[in-house]
Every structure is written in C-alpha cells, then in structure tokens.
Amino acid sequence: MNMWQFAATFFYLGKLPFFPGAWGSLGALILWTFLPLSYPLQLFIISLFFIVGVISSKKIALERDDHDPPEVVIDEAVGMGIALFMLPHSIAIYSIAFILFRIFDIFKPSFIYRIQNFPGGWGIMLDDVLAGIITWSICQGLSTIL
C-alpha cells in the first residue's frame, strides 16, 4: 500500500470487510470526540482531509478503474467531520449525526446524487460534503434542544 491508499482508505478503515463507508464515518466520529471545540483546528482538519481526499481518491479511482471505489472512505470522514463541526460533544447529538449522515450518504437525495458525477476526486468528495452540510444543519438545530 502506498501513502495515497493509506489516505484514501482513511487509515485503512476502508479495507475492513463490511460497510466501509460506515467504518470511515465512525473513524471520523471517534476522532471528533477527541478534538477540542476549536473553530480553527476543526476547519483546518476538514480542509486538509478534503484536499488530501480529492487527490488520493482520484488516484485510487484511476488505479482501480472505478469511479468511486468502496474502499475510498476519506470522503465519509470529511463529510462526518462537517456534520460534527463545532457541535457540542454529546453522545446523543453525535449518534443522531452519524445516523443522519449515513442516511444522506447512502440514499443521496437528487442534488447530492448529481454532484457525484463531477470528474476525478471532486465527485467522490463533494457528495459527502453536501451530506455533511445537510446533517450539520439539522444537528445544529437539534443541539439547541438536546
């Protein structure tokens, strides 16, 4: 394995045998539980993972001759990071965010589905970015009542 595979599989979580997207999302959720509620730090991590994700997912997709290989889960990690961005550390809100993000990622409402057709790593990454933004919006509202 090379460094691009390591990055694209989000520390090899995408290589786990079943439901690689769920493992990538869970890995990001665990990471986020340890991050302080620091706007610059969380934004930096999301931005770094996004940039690395666009590059690494494109390289792996070309290598595998697959427009969105299942083992590429850095997109789920970025989307989950966006979904949890600056939300209070709470088991309830994190659980809801995880479930909602997975629903949006799996079922992809029409505008999310269409964006995955962008070329290269952009399409792989941007559908999960949108799923993360929608999840964050819902959870931001819920966090005020939970």
Image (tube, helix red, strand yellow):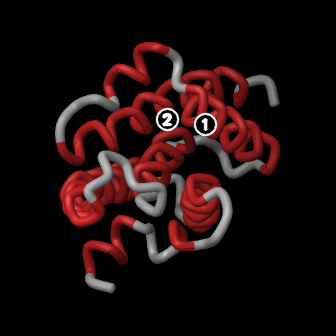
The residue located at (23%, 52%) in the rendering is 54
On screen, residue 93 versus residue 105, left or right, reads: right
As helix, strand or loop, the secondary structure at mark 1 comes to: helix
- The amino acid at mark 2 is Gly
Vertical relation: 137 (above or below) 15: above
Residue shown at the point (59%, 27%) measured from the top left: 107
Instruction: Quadrant for the N terminus, please.
Output: bottom left
Query: Closer to the camera, 92 or 28?
Result: 28
Real-space Cα separation, disc 1 to disc 2, in angstroms: 6 Å
* Amino acid type indicated by mark 1: Phe
Q: Is residue 48 visible?
A: no
- Are the two marked residues, 1 and 2, in contact with CB atoms closer than 8 angstroms? yes
Q: Is residue 96 left or right of residue 69?
A: right
For the point 45% across and 76% down, which residue is it? 11
Question: Which label's residue is closer to the chain start, 1 or 2?
Answer: 1
Bin the neighbour count of mark 2 within 10 Å (Cα to Cα): few under 14, some 14-19, many 20 and up. Answer: many
Q: Which residue is mark 2?
A: 132
Checking the image for residue 61, the label placed there is none
Secondary element at tag 2: helix
Q: Please provide percent x and percent y for residue 42.
A: 41, 53
Q: Which residue is mark 1?
A: 101
How far across and down, in percent of the image, does residue 53 sit? 29, 56
- Where the C terminus falls, by quadrant? top right
Q: Residue furthest top?
A: 110
